[in-house]
Amino acid sequence: MMSTKAFTLVSAVEWELLAGDKERVHIECVECCGKNLYVGTSDCVVYHFLLEERALPTGTATFSATKQLHRHLGFRKPVNELRAASALNRLLVLCDNSITLVNMMSLEPVPSGARIKGATALALNENPVNGDPFCVEVCIISVKRRTIQLFLVYEDRVQIVREVSTPEQPLAVAVDGHFLCLALTTQYIILNYNTGFSQDLFPYCSEEKRPIVKRIGRQEFLLAGPGGLGMFATVAGISQRAPVRWSENVIGAAICFPYVIALDDEFITVHSMLDQQQKQTLPFKEGHILQDFEGRVIVATSKGVYILVPLPLEKQIQDLLASHRVEEALVLAKGARRNIPKEKFQVMYRRILQQAGFIQFAQLQFLEAKELFRSGQLDVRELISLYPFLLPTSSSFTRSHPPLHEYADLHQLTQGDQEKMAKCKRFLMSYLNEVRSTEVANGYKEDIDTALLKLYAEADHDSLLDLLVTENSCLLTDSAAWLEKHNKYFALGLLYHYNNQDAAAVQLWVNIVNGDIHDSTRSDLYEYVVDFLTYSLDQELVWKYADWVLQKSEEVGVQVFTKRPLDEQQNSFNPDRVLTCLKKYPTALAKYLEHLVIDRRLQKEEYHTQLALLYLDKVLQQRSGTGSEAAEATDTQLKLQHLLQKSDLYRVHLLIDRTRGAGLPMESAILHGKLEEHEEALRILVHELRDFAAAEDYCLWRSEGRDPPYRQRLFHTLLAMYLQPGPAAPELAVAATDLLNHHAADFDAARVLPLLPGSWSVQLLRPFLTGAVRNSVHARRTTQVALGLAKSENLIYKYDKIKLKGSSVQLSDKKLCQMCQNPFCEPVFVRYPNGGLVHTHCAASRHRNPSSPGPGART
């Protein structure tokens, strides 16, 4: 058990003020009401003192008592009990089994002589049920056996209200509302005198120990239980608090929240109602009275009166914190809520939580510290300030006064232990990262983020980059110097970028790539710079570093132009200017032209021609090189051929001149095809290249999207070329049969058959002939179907005409035209199938203007 100084014992009334040299006189009872202190003695005298309290700097107080007067009550018995009824200005005095009403100031008995007789003990009902403010409710233990009486006491009269019988002789009583808490001979009970219901609490032996029954709050009592326990009981007969353990020989008990104070023969002990622990022990011999009056605790011997002055709860809590007794301090602080105004308590409690947090932090109990910091709404700068150089130089923060802890900095707290310092830094990183997006950071985001950046940089933490690429409030000047100190140049570039200093950022990254400064954060920093410039809106910055990225790698560097958002390419980066820039970089130039022609599909002759020429030059260059570039040359050549086939915008004649004599027959054939010079194109493919498949593909390519006769002419031209006599005739004959058999639908069989050599067998041309016959039969049948449908339609029209001619039409001057509603002046008219008659000119007018109304279809 660790002691707590909760009270100091000070003298209130010395014996000399009471009885002077009367040795045989003893103090029997005391009462206190405000500044008025009353003392009853064994010689039947009541003394009235005025107490003056004087506060001390230590937080305690001293008392001085001034004697006002004393009065002998006229009996020879001691004064047993005193109770003040301040609302009536009356003092109830129990002496010789009689309760007398006297004036609180003059101590004169009331003129009416009102008194209560036959009382051995009394208690005031501090939770009255009567409702009359000008009377008090008094409960007495009557001299009649097993009887409790209830009275209403007024200024000058008393009135009995009820008499209640008890199962055993009552020895002590406390009252709350309709409930009586009674110490009987062998047990404690709760008795509702209004309903008569009683509830047994627990047994005890009155012969062995003095009973204690004390009301401590609304419907709750404190009792001296067996085994040296102070038991709490409610009017429902249950205990809502754990018992406190005090002496077996307790004489009296008092309450000064949150403490229970007990008196025995030698000591005054102080116990917490919050954790039931004994907190303080004060030596005090010969004491026999312990009572509390409105928060003031008075203890007395037979010769003197003393006051237990509580130390302010705040000082008690601070003493506990100073002893690192965090849990006890927090329990006491929570318990103090009921005695302190709400706003003041909240301020005090937050500070206590903060102090407790720093104590746990110093003990490296980081989880507990974090929870206390959060609950106490700690200004996070208090924590950051422990770490040297983490707060920005511009911060105006000063530590709380009085201080929340005793440490100058982290070095003192850890006593230079590097491992402990590292743990503390890791905790701060975690804590700052958690609170930076919460209300805790409001107003301090710059301090928090700057400190977090410094911690990340110092620890080489991966989260440094995450911090800088997301929204942050890092102070540029402090952070830049710190990052440079720890060689975090890539991160410094990100910081510059976040602060809209892209030029400084890119220059820093360029220096890293060039090897001028060292930072291994990113192995792909060059690609990162290219990507950064690609999406940069600063045109000047892009143009400034365009040459640098292209010199490093043409294929990668050109992406600053090719991967830009399309709207930006159209508005900010004119293709002609880009092409001018790329003239020194042929690979990049080709990539960019491919982007313009293939990806963006710009329909501009200059771009298509320039790309074709680039391909051509590269093919020629590669063909003149070594065989190691053959594969690459083939790729470029395929790109050239594809462009020549798909594009219609390049300058064909220019390219024909460039390819003439260059040994590029396929490209020449494609170009001749673009000029509709099909015989020359096919000649190249058939006679120079001997590529019959390419010749067939040529016919298909050139006839794509054209009418069937155009395709037929191309295939007939190719067939005629295959059938020409010459040294290669056998080979060409095979190609001719393959052509006919594979593309039977693209030939006119009637024209083909006369051209074929008579030596060719039917079996050789079977696929062609089968296809030709099938096509011919299909065409004939289709034509027959169409002819039959036309004849049927004509027959229907003839039937309708004959039917109409078979009926007569009567025309008179009374008949009106159904269009103009005018009569017919001559026997010329137009008749519609519905029988309507109109003028010929009206019918003609309707024919010219179909939207005009009419009677129906004309016959």
Image (cartoon, helix red, strand yellow):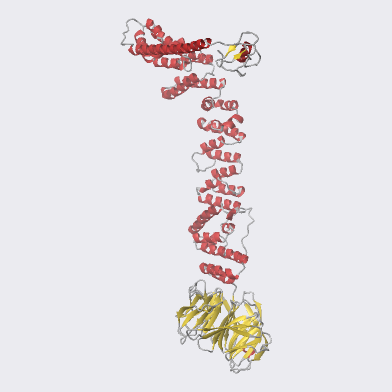
Q: Picture quarter containing residue 823?
A: top right
Q: Quadrant of the C terminus?
A: top right
| In-image side of 407 versus 225 (left or right) | right
Q: Could you tell me residue 640's position as x and y percent?
A: 48, 21
135 is higher (above) or lower (below) than 20: above
271 is higher (above) or lower (below) than 825: below
| In-image side of 276 versus 135 (left or right) | left
Return the residue nearer the eye: 449 or 479.
Answer: 449
Q: Could you tell me residue 181's position as x and y percent?
A: 52, 79
Q: Could you tell me residue 185's position as x and y percent?
A: 47, 85
147 is higher (above) or lower (below) than 342: below
Return the residue nearer the eye: 61 or 447.
Answer: 61
Residue at the location (61% across, 30% down)? Answer: 571
Q: Picture quarter containing residue 550?
A: top right
363 is higher (above) or lower (below) than 463: below
Exactly how many numbered labels are in the figure? 0
Tell me, yes or no, if residue 719 can be seen here: yes
Residue at the location (39% across, 11% down)? Answer: 776
Tell me, yes or no, if residue 389 can be seen here: no
